[in-house]
Amino acid sequence: MPKRYEPPDWDALQRRVVGLGEHSHRKSHFAVLQERLEELERSRAVLRAERDLSQLYLDTVPAFVVVLDLAGRITMINSFGCRLLGHEPGELIGQDWFATCVTPGSPRLTAQSHIDALLRSGALAPGYFEGELVSRDGRPILVAWRNVLLRESSGRIVGTLCAGEDITTRRAAEQALHNLAFFDPLTSLPNRRLLNDRLRQCMTASERSGFHGALIFLDLDQFKLLNDTRGHAVGDLLLQRAGSRLQEAVRACDTVARMGGDEFVVLLQNLNTRPADAGRQAAGVAAKLVQTLSGPYDLPGAAYQGTVSAGVVLFRGSDSTVDELLQHADVAMYQAKASGRNATRFYDPAMQDAIDARTALADALRSALQAQAIVLHYQPQFDPHGKCTGLEALARWPRTASTWVAPSQFIPVAEEAGLIEQLGEHVLSIACRQLAAWSNATRLAELPISVNVSAVQLRSPGFVAAVGRCLRESGVAPQRLKLEITESVLVHNPDEVIAKLSALRRSGVTFALDDFGTGYSSLAYLKRLPINQVKIDRSFVHDLPVDPNSAAICNAIVGLGNSLGLQVVAEGVETKAQWDHLRVAGCGMAQGYYFCRPLPPEHIPAQLGADASGTQ
Ligand code: C2E
Ligand code: MG
Ligand code: MG
């Protein structure tokens, strides 16, 4: 800081000069001094007037004027600034500006780093910045700043002069105007105009990313009747509640808009790149939204429960215009209404058929689970000496007497339809009962059974308890149960997953990492997972021994597994040549059609007793 200017004590000086004048021999000196003094007095009066004017100006301008030293301490603040901040003028001098007056949290850091950057740059031009101050009583004040560096005559920077305009009211007014233009006043949801805007942006983004988007047009059935019979106030309340329910049901990146009346549109972003998968995702969300809106509403007078019709259109890129898409969703919604209301329809008939088929499959699976119709087949695993080392349980769904639905088809349906927990527990309980049933059989008594667990199933909160229940009820030692997981379990919340697996591992259950090499393949996680077995995916085994890349991958997985002390199982071994290659590479176990196809449990004892050496 510059040394503060200390004015001389003019009155004492004058007294001394008058004293000098009393001696006549000094009279001429005295006259000169008297003149100088008068001149100085005049300059002093001018300076004082100028200073008072500047102070008056500083205190009158409707702006903050603050001077900070290099450490961010306040060396001057005008009375307008003090008043707005609710402090007495003297109170703030010497205080840390950022700690006292700037809103805590990230904006404070931003304000400080802005000033720091300005100081570092030594810029001559002012720096502009918008930031939030906090008044003594906690009121936020939004300020637009122009900050300039203060320099001594030598050029040395000594601080910052910050001049700021209070823009709190202006910003609020701008926000209110923006809200009026883009939001529905009744529900505070985006209006048609904002939806159009977001839809346009979403289409452009989808063009680049390849992800699908979807529009879901929702209309409350019989809303007019409620409005007419119970009055507009009740109708408005229902619309507000419906709007909040929708908003709570979607992800933050999705948009819920009110189009007017009882019509809402939901814009979904980032759906799968494959149309069929994206269609299923959109159908799933539409079903959830319809269910959410159809739940009972606690309205004044009496509760209300109504149905909803929904129309869905899928899009990718900008093949259609915004208006066309909205129109298509609207058309689909009218088809839903025409079909008797309380329904959801896709604009694309082929998509509708696919969704219908999927819904039918989910319904059939629900019934099959209730009827305990899902069964398990078992595929033995062998070591290089032809000794059976365990069995993998594979779910089978005999949908009719002649058609078996493959697990690759019905597991995803179970996940989507919320049936995976039930299916998973059913499979676990059959496998545990099978273990108990084989406890006394020769060759089978010691063998572990591996049960596949999907990522969605593992994420369900009741998973660990379900495993414990099945083990307890069957009375089987946990060491005989092996759970097969895939790397996809780590996509969401890896820490939580690892904690669950570790809890089971402590109880004695073991784990295999299935389909290794096809997914995440993060060695960092591989190290953290409590697994004791990795299974080489059959896609790599398939091309052995001819394809050098597959051979290299299989060899690498075997090497990695062995060096980490993990058992390595090759899946899908179909030929002797494949097995020979794997065995030479050091693979300790294999399973595949070369040894044995998955079989119903009643065929297993004979299969292992009759020919446990491998070849079929
Ligand atoms: P996975 O766990 O990798 O199971 C191995 C799959 O390879 C089984 O198909 C099996 O029948 C097949 N396989 C075995 N040996 C050979 C072979 O030599 N050649 C060929 N080409 N294939 C062979 P499956 O039974 O159709 O099961 C498919 C997938 O479905 C399983 O892959 C597993 O991820 C899943 N899955 C099966 N059962 C269940 C279950 O109970 N729960 C869960 N969550 N998923 C299951
Ligand atoms: Mg498996
Ligand atoms: Mg596998």
Image: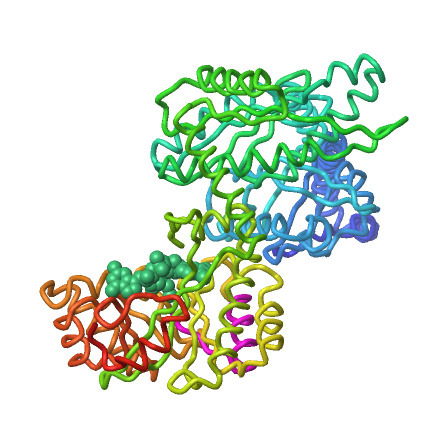
The residue nearer to you, when weighing 130 against 165, is: 130
- Residue at 52 percent across and 72 percent down: it is 501
The residue nearer to you, when weighing 607 against 17, is: 607
Percent x, y for residue 43?
A: 70, 37
Identify the residue at the far right of this view: 301
Percent x, y for residue 341?
A: 62, 21
Is residue 519 something one can see in this rendering?
Answer: no
Residue 481 lies left or right of residue 106; in this view the side is: left
Residue 274 lies left or right of residue 9; in this view the side is: left
The stretch of residues the image draws in magenta is 495-513
Q: Is residue 153 magenta?
A: no
Q: Is residue 501 magenta?
A: yes
Is residue 432 something one can see in this rendering?
Answer: yes
Residue 471 falls in image quadrant = bottom right
Q: What colouring does the structure picture have? A: rainbow
Would you place residue 348 above or below residue 283 in this image? above
Q: Main secondary structure of the magenta part?
A: helix
Q: Could you tell me how many numbered marks the image carries?
A: 0
The residue nearer to you, when weighing 440 against 284, is: 440
Would you place residue 96 above or below residue 253 in this image? below
Identify the residue at the far top of this view: 228
- Residue at 43 percent across and 52 percent down: it is 398
Residue 581 lies left or right of residue 70; in this view the side is: left
- Residue at 81 percent across and 12 percent down: it is 228
Quarter of the rendered image showing ligand 2: bottom left
From the image, which quarter does the N terminus lie in? bottom right
Residue 81 falls in image quadrant = top right
Percent x, y for residue 41?
A: 75, 39
Percent x, y for residue 39?
A: 70, 37
The residue nearer to you, when weighing 38 against 600, is: 600
- Residue at 36 percent across and 71 percent down: it is 603
